[in-house]
Image (spheres, rainbow, N blue to C red):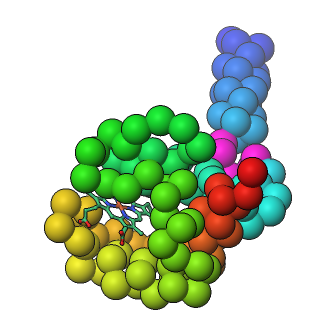
């Protein structure tokens, strides 16, 4: 009887460890601003925009990110994002982005220009 309880407790402990070890929060954060910006673009923007060096946007209206680098520099991109993110913009839904996230996105978009 007691040994069975101990066994159950051990199983619970092991299961607990396994789930916490796998949580995304414990994974190391991406390193540079460009890498963080890319991860963010893939997570939050790629549903509509083409965010890489090739490919078409999923939403035909949404400009591919590689074209944005021609229209904006880091500063004007930050301003443009401030305009776009709170009210949303036509087809683009309102989205919350922190300032540092916008900076990372700007760094990533800027990097798409470089061959
Ligand atoms: C649900 C679809 C959708 C998502 C998600 C989305 N966008 Fe857009 N976005 C659009 C569309 C459509 C347009 C172009 C039409 C318009 O101007 O409304 C646009 C326009 C833009 C523009 C303006 C381009 C210009 O010419 O001024 C920028 C900058 C932009 N998006 C950045 C982003 C970023 C950064 C993200 C992710 C954080 C994102 N978008 C996520 C649909 C989306």
The quadrant where residue 6 appears:
top right
Q: Percent from the top left, x then y, of residue 38? A: 63, 53
Eyeballing the image, is 8 above or below 38? above
- Quarter for ligand 1? bottom left
Count how many numbered circles sit on residues in the image: 0
Residue 16 x %, y %: 68, 34
Residue 82 in picture, x, y percent from top left: 41, 84
Where residue 110 sits in the image (x, y, percent)? 65, 66
Q: Which residues are magenta?
A: 23-27
Q: Is residue 24 magenta?
A: yes
Type of secondary structure dominating the magenta stretch: helix
Q: Quadrant of residue 2?
A: top right
Classify residue 14 by image quadrant.
Answer: top right
Residue drawn 80% across and 62% down? 32
One can see residue 4 in this view: yes
91 horizontally vs 36: left or right: left
Magenta-drawn stretch contains 39: no
Q: Foreground: 42 or 96?
A: 42
At a point 54% along the width and 38% down the height, the residue shown is 54
Furthest residue to the left? 90
């Amino acid at each position: 009887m007691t040994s069975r309880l101990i066994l159950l407790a051990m199983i619970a402990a092991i299961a607990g460890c396994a789930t916490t070890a796998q949580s995304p929060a414990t994974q190391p954060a991406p390193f540079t601003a460009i890498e963080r910006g890319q991860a963010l673009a893939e997570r939050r923007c790629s549903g509509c925009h083409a965010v890489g060096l090739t490919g078409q946007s999923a939403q035909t209206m949404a400009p591919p990110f590689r074209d944005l680098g021609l229209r904006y520099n880091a500063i004007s991109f930050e301003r443009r994002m401030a305009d776009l993110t709170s009210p949303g913009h036509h087809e683009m839904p309102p989205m919350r982005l922190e300032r540092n996230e916008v900076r990372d996105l700007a760094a990533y978009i800027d990097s798409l220009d470089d061959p």
